[in-house]
Image: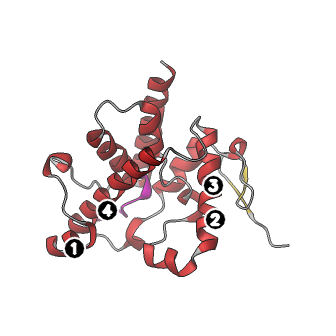
Amino acid sequence: MARAWQRMLSGRRLDLLDPTPLDIEIEDIAHGLAFVARWNGQTLGDFAYSVAEHSLLVEEIFARQNPGIGPRWRLAALLHDAPEYVLGDMISPVKAAIGKGYNELDTRLTGAVHLRFGLPATLPAPIKKAIKVADLISARLEAEQIAGFSKAEADKLFGKTDASVIRGLTIRLRPPAEVRAAYTARYTELLAEITA
């Protein structure tokens, strides 16, 4: 049988077909996501726009759109793409081409990640929907600011965005080590709020 696990830098061995929360560490997630490029690396700048950087932006947009939302759900927003630390970031057309198999892996890993960090394996529908909205707004900003889309193209593909939600937000391109540290720091801040 083919190997279906990956060794993490933490020493954990994550079984992709049957992931357990015990084999998931935030440092592995932060490291992996900091080195995974969004848009298949087809972005402007000297550094790839990483999934970790995207996740930080999604969490910020989610918090802006949902004032007063608890840190637990902001953590869910930060972790929304966590499975990509082992699956990589595939653009939507590739996910659609692969189909059900990718979705099953993603769902299993997402459930294990959520349980590891004290979230329900399946998020409540309103929270999941709100995170998806923030994710779409982030994708729209990325498309226009760093992925070469015109404003008209971005409007057509991702929809128009409430200016108050995105005011002052610009895409940041940083070295992976810096983004990894920022992601881990944000996780630590949210965890402190949750346990306070």
Which residue in the rendered view is the most extreme toward the bottom? 97
Q: Looking at the rendered structure, which numbered label has been put on residue 156? A: 1
* Residue type marked 1: Lys
Disc 1 crowd rating (10 Å Cα; few below 14, some 14-19, many 20+) is: few
Disc 4 crowd rating (10 Å Cα; few below 14, some 14-19, many 20+) is: many
Task: Say which residue label 2 marks.
Answer: 104
* Residue type marked 4: Ala
Q: Report how far apart the C-alphas of labels 1 and 3 lie in the structure.
A: 32 Å
Identify the secondary structure beneath mark 4: helix
Residue 81, percent from left and from top: 49, 55
Residue 49 is one of the magenta-drawn residues: yes
Identify the secondary structure beneath mark 1: helix
Residues tagged 1 and 2 counted as in contact (Cβ below 8 A): no
Quarter in which the N terminus is drawn? bottom right
Task: Say which residue label 3 marks.
Answer: 109
Residues tagged 4 and 2 counted as in contact (Cβ below 8 A): no
Residue 97 is one of the magenta-drawn residues: no
Q: Magenta stretch: give its range.
A: 44-52
Q: Report how far apart the C-alphas of labels 2 and 3 lie in the structure.
A: 9 Å
Task: Say which residue label 4 marks.
Answer: 139
Please tell me which residue lies in front, 165 or 180. Answer: 165
Q: Nearer the viewer, mark 1 or mark 3?
A: 1
Disc 3 crowd rating (10 Å Cα; few below 14, some 14-19, many 20+) is: many
Q: Main secondary structure of the magenta part?
A: loop
* Sequence-earlier tag: 1 or 2: 2
Please tell me which residue lies in front, 38 or 135. Answer: 135
Is 32 situated left or right of 177 in this image?
Answer: right
Which residue is at 16% across, 47% downward? 168
